[in-house]
Image: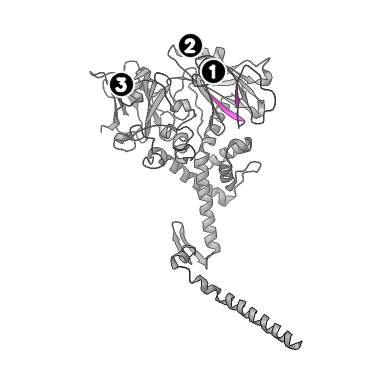
Amino acid sequence: MMQLKRQQIIQIFVVACAILLLIVKAPFAIAEVPPDVRDSISTPDEVDTSIGTLHFFDGVPTPETTETVYDDLDRMRGTDAFLKGIPLASVYGLMEGQYSLGATAAHQVIIFDQLMDSESLYLTANTSTLYTWGVLDLKRDGATVIDVPPGMLGMINDAAFDWIVDIGPAGPDEGNGGKFLVLPPDFEGAIPEGYFVVPTKAYRHSLFLRTSIADGIDQAANLIKNNLKVYPFSQKDNPPAMEFVSASGKAFNTVHANNFKFYEELDAVIQYEPYGLIDRERRGLFASIGIEKGKAFAPDARMEAILTDAVAIGNAAARSIVWYPRVDGTLQGVQHYPDTDSSWLMGYTGRNVFFTGEDGETMNSDARVMFHYPYTYVSPAMATPQEGTGSDYGVAYLDSNKQFFDGSKTYQLHIPADPPAKDFWAVTIYDSQTRSMLQTGQPFPTVGSQTEGIQQNADGSTDVYFCPQPPTGYENNWLETVPGKSWFVIFRMYGPLQPWLDQSWRPGEVELLD
C-alpha cells in the first residue's frame, strides 16, 4: 500500500515537472515566430512621430507620453468634429440670423423684397432672384402647414442640412403649389387628406423659396406676400395672419463661427434635436469632445485650449478642401471641365447631393465639406439641371494659372458669344473670408446679361473685369475688388440650354491681366 502511494507521488511529480518545463520553455516559443511578425506586433521603447518622441517600457507608454497622445487625440477629434459638424452649425446660423430680425414664429417669414445685397452675411447668395425663407419648429408647434402658390422654386432642409422635400417643379406639387404638411419625428395621429405629407427626423427645419423677377421685383414680392401661408396644423381653422419681415439692405449674420464658438453652436443643435437627427458615429464623435445630448458642454481650460487649436486646424482644412480640392482623389468629379484642367468647379462633387460616392454607400466627407463650407441648401434638383429650367453654376476660386485672386490686381473673364441661357446669365463676386457677397461700393456685386449698359465685343462676346477701378469704357462690365483682400466668383446660368449642359459652350477662365 505504501509502495503504491509512493509510485503515485512520483508520477504526480513527473507530470508537474513536465508542465513546469513547458512553462519555462514557453518564452522560447515566441522566438520561433519570424522577426518581421514579432516586430509588427511590438512597440519599441522610443518612437519618433510628428507629435514628438513617444516613450514606452516594454510596450507600456509612460505617463508623459500618455498625456501627449491624449492631447493629440482630443485635437484630432475636435478637428474632425468641426469638419463633420459644419452642416449642422451652418443651418443653425441661418435660423439664428432669421431670429435676429424678429422672425421667430412659424407665420413670420423673411423676404428679400428688394433682393439681397452685400450688407447681409449669407453664404454665396445671389442678387438675381427673390429669396424667401422661414424656420419651422416642430418641437414647439407640432405638425406645420406650408401653403405655397404656383410658380415657386424651393425646398425644405432639416437641422442637419439634409434634404427633406422639394417645392415647385421638382416637388410633389409639380410647380402647381399646394399645402405641405410637415410632420415632427414623434408624430402620432391620423394623416389628413389634401396635403403633401412630409415626414421628418428633426424638429427644426429651414424653408427656402426662390421667385423669378422676370416680371418685376414688386410682382414677385406680391406673389409671395399675397399667397404664402405658414402656420401650425393645430391652428388650421384660424391661422394667424402672415408677417413678412423685409431683410433687404439689412446687415445681419447667418454664417457659422470658425473659432471656439463653433462648438457652442454645434452643441445647441445637439441639445435641441432628437437622437435620430444624425448617425451614431457622428454623435459619438461629438460626445468624445464633450458635446452630448442631455449634458452640459463645459470643457475645462485644457480642453478649451485644445478645441481652440482644433477648430483653427479644421477651418484651415475646410478652406484647403474648397480652394485646392484633390481632383485626382476624394474630389474627383468636382471640376466642370476636367479635360482641360479648368479652374471652374461644381458645387456638388459628381453632382451627388448626398455625398455618398460613386457607389452611393460611401460617405465622402471632403465632398460634404466642399459644399457646406461655402454654400447652403441641398436639393437633388439643384444638381441635375434640366434644359431651359432652373439654374446651374460654375465657381472659380483660382485664376487660369491656379493662383488665388488678389484684390489689388486686374483680371478678365471672357464670355463667348451666345451664352446658352434661356433666361439670363450672371457673374457675382464673393468675399473669401465670409463666403458672402464682397462688400464694396457696389451693393449688388453682379454683372450679367441683365446689367444695363453692359458692353459686348464685336463678335457678340462679353468681357467682365475684376479690379479696384473700372476700365475706361467698361464701367458696366466691372466688378470692384479690394486691395489687400481676396475673392472668388460664381458664374450662373438661368434656364441653361443644351450647349451648356453638353459643354459645347464654355466660359473662359478668369485670367490675370497685370
Q: Of the two numbered discs 2 and 1 on the same chain, state the one appearing first in sequence.
A: 1
Position of the N terminus, as image quadrant, is: bottom right
Name the residue located 42 percent from the left edge and 28 percent from the top edge.
437
Name the image quarter holding residue 505.
top left
Task: Name the amino acid, label 2.
Answer: Gln
What range is drawn magenta here? 191-215
**Residue 418: x percent and y percent?**
30, 19
**First-in-chain label (3 vs 2):** 2
Residue 199 colored in magenta in the image:
yes
Can residue 252 be seen at all in this image of the molecule? yes
Farthest right residue in view: 1
Question: Dot 2, how many residues are within 10 Å of its Cα: few (below 14), some (14-19), or many (20+)?
Answer: some
Residue at (46, 65) in percent of width and height: 39
Q: CA distance from mark 2 to mark 1?
A: 22 Å
Front-most of 121 and 56? 56
> Which residue is disc 1 drawn over?
173
